[in-house]
């Protein structure tokens, strides 16, 4: 049986591996899932993944793979050697890229290795609808774009998607319950949004149907990360009750 704390993925967005280690020590016992993204991975590579494994944490390797199908599938094959729990690909990479990546992962993990869940990134939480239209030239509305990329991810056989929690309720009704909804851009009450433009509180995200919440700075930049994480868990428990 899982609790609210199991739904939180703490983002280790730092180039300092010693600080990441300190955070995991402080959060031990209440957080078990960690995101290794561009910053930490670029600084330390697989040593960052090995560190999370050492502390018994589950690993969300968030590299947002996006390239031609052959390149991404080969990268996915390398990732399979390190037995992470979840990876991201950009849904904008297209159906063939996502399908080939899934096929490669199934082949590489068919002999007993851990199979990472594959989730497709839809629209980054730093994007607004105005930016999508004026800067990126996307004619669809933001919700339409998110839904289209979510549908493409599902068609490719991925395990779920990453999208803003503001779209979760709309998406939850369109997909099976086992199609995962991973939501960054979650901000507890009275915390700064920083560069996130589409945010909700943890309780609101869970209430809308999110399966996992990716939370970074509200926990990692807090004076007391353990207390910050526990406060979020307590608010989620209150919502559940």
Image (cartoon, rainbow, N blue to C red):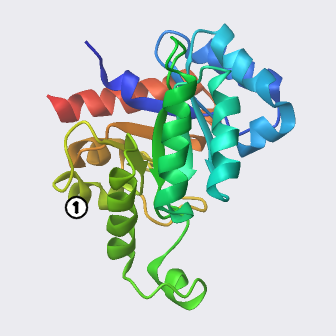
Indicate the quadrant containing the N terminus: top left, top right, bottom left or bottom right.
Answer: top left
In the visual, does 207 lie left or right of 182? Answer: left
Answer yes or no: is residue 200 visible: no
* Residue 227 horizontal/vertical position (percent): 50, 23
Indicate the quadrant containing the C terminus: top left, top right, bottom left or bottom right.
Answer: top left
In the visual, does 34 lie left or right of 158? Answer: right
Residue at 38% from the left image edge and 83% from the top image edge: 140
* Residue on which the image places disc 1: 170
* Circle 1 residues within 10 Å: few <14, some 14–19, many ≥20: some
In the visual, does 209 lie left or right of 24? Answer: left
Question: Between residues 103 and 194, which one lies in front from this camera angle?
Answer: 103
* Residue 21 horizontal/vertical position (percent): 73, 18
Answer yes or no: is residue 25 visible: yes
Residue at 81% from the left image edge and 37% from the top image edge: 15
Helix, strand, or loop for circle 1? helix
Question: Between residues 13 and 238, which one lies in front from this camera angle?
Answer: 13
Query: In the image, is residue 233 above or below residue 203?
Result: above
Query: In the image, is residue 227 above or below residue 26?
Result: below
Query: In the image, is residue 34 above or below residue 142?
Result: above
In the visual, does 150 lie left or right of 225? Answer: left
* Residue 221 horizontal/vertical position (percent): 65, 38
Question: Between residues 141 and 154, which one lies in front from this camera angle?
Answer: 154
Total tally of numbered discs in the picture: 1
* Residue 236 horizontal/vertical position (percent): 29, 33
Q: Quadrant of residue 203?
A: top left
Question: Between residues 171 and 24, which one lies in front from this camera angle?
Answer: 171
Q: Quadrant of residue 8?
A: top left
Residue at 84% from the left image edge and 30% from the top image edge: 44
């Amino acid at each position: 049986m899982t609790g609210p704390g199991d739904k939180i993925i703490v983002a280790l967005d730092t180039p300092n591996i010693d600080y990441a280690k300190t955070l995991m020590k402080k959060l031990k016992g209440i957080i078990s899932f960690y995101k290794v993204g561009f910053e930490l991975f670029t600084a330390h590579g697989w040593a960052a993944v090995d560190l999370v494994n050492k502390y018994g944490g589950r690993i969300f390797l968030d590299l947002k793979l996006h390239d031609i199908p052959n390149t991404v599938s080969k990268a996915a094959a390398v990732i399979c050697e390190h037995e992470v729990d979840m990876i991201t690909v950009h849904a904008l990479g297209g159906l063939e890229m996502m399908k080939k990546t899934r096929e490669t992962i199934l082949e590489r993990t068919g002999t007993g290795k851990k199979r990472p869940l594959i989730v497709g990134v839809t629209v980054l939480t730093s994007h607004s609808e105005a930016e999508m239209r004026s800067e990126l030239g996307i004619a669809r509305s933001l919700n339409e774009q998110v839904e289209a990329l979510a549908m493409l991810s599902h068609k490719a056989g991925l395990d779920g998607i990453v999208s803003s929690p503001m779209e979760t309720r709309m998406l939850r009704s369109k997909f099976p319950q086992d199609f995962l909804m991973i939501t960054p851009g979650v901000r507890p009450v009275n915390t700064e949004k920083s560069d996130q433009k589409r945010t909700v509180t943890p309780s609101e995200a869970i209430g809308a149907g999110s399966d996992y919440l990716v939370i970074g700075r509200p926990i990692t930049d807090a004076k007391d990360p353990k207390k910050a994480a526990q406060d979020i868990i307590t608010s989620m428990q209150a919502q559940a009750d």
